[in-house]
Amino acid sequence: MNRGPFETTLPVLLSPGLNYYFEPGENQQAERSGYQPAHYAANQRLLGVNGGLRIQDIKDGTSQTILGGEVKEGIRAWGDPLNFRDPAQGINQGPQGFGGPFGPGAHILFADGSIRFLSEDIDPAVLKALSTPNGRERVEEVERNSRK
């Protein structure tokens, strides 16, 4: 019933920096069955299995909360309900995290709709603060304390 739509390529979900749909040499079930990829994934702390938050539930502020970002490993089909990652795992730190093809970092989508390039060298405490929707961390304070 839904197979036809999920076999449709959505150019908006393809990264212009990747020259492959799924990882080279990888024989994923999705690729063999015709499903199309998403080179982006959601933040599992906001949008997980059978879950999700309303915008008013993002107490840290939408400009301070990661909604999703680029992936270059562990690519899933765009209709895959498990296409999410934990940003706090780091950037370009493995197939279960976010990572981008444009240098040492990744483009990250925030809940306010803005996109920022975050370095893979970002302070882990800052990245964790940006990953949580209602941890009540103030990113400026986390940054200030991490420099001490």
Image (spheres, rainbow, N blue to C red):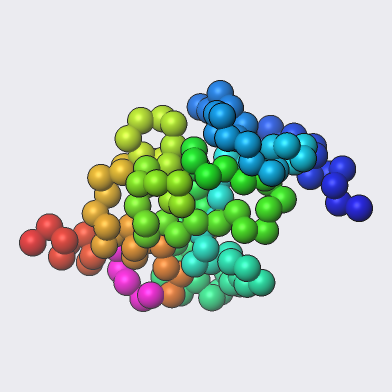
Residue for point 62% across, 32% down: 21
From where the camera sits, is residue 97 visible? Answer: yes
Residue for point 23% across, 65% down: 142
* Residue 144 image offset from top left, x and y in percent: 17, 61
> 105 left or right of 109?
left
Query: Which of 97 and 136 lies nearest the eye of the viewer?
Result: 97
> 127 left or right of 69?
left
Q: Is residue 29 above or below residue 62?
A: above
Q: Is residue 137 magenta?
A: yes
* Residue 148 image offset from top left, x and y in percent: 8, 61
Q: Residue 89's quadrant in the figure?
A: bottom left
Q: Is residue 56 magenta?
A: no
Residue, far right = 1
Q: Is residue 47 above or below residue 2?
A: below
Residue for point 22% across, 66% down: 141
> 68 left or right of 124?
right
Query: Which of 38 and 62 lies nearest the eye of the viewer?
Result: 38
Predominant SS along the magenta part: loop
Residue for point 42% across, 68% down: 132
From where the camera sits, is residue 108 visible? Answer: no
- Region in magenta: 135-140
Query: Which of 103 and 54 lies nearest the eye of the viewer?
Result: 103
Q: Is residue 37 above or below residue 43?
A: above
* Residue 40 image offset from top left, x and y in percent: 56, 44
Q: Residue 34's quadrant in the figure?
A: top right
* Residue 2 image offset from top left, x and y in percent: 86, 51
Q: How many numbered marks does the figure carry?
A: 0
Residue, far top = 19
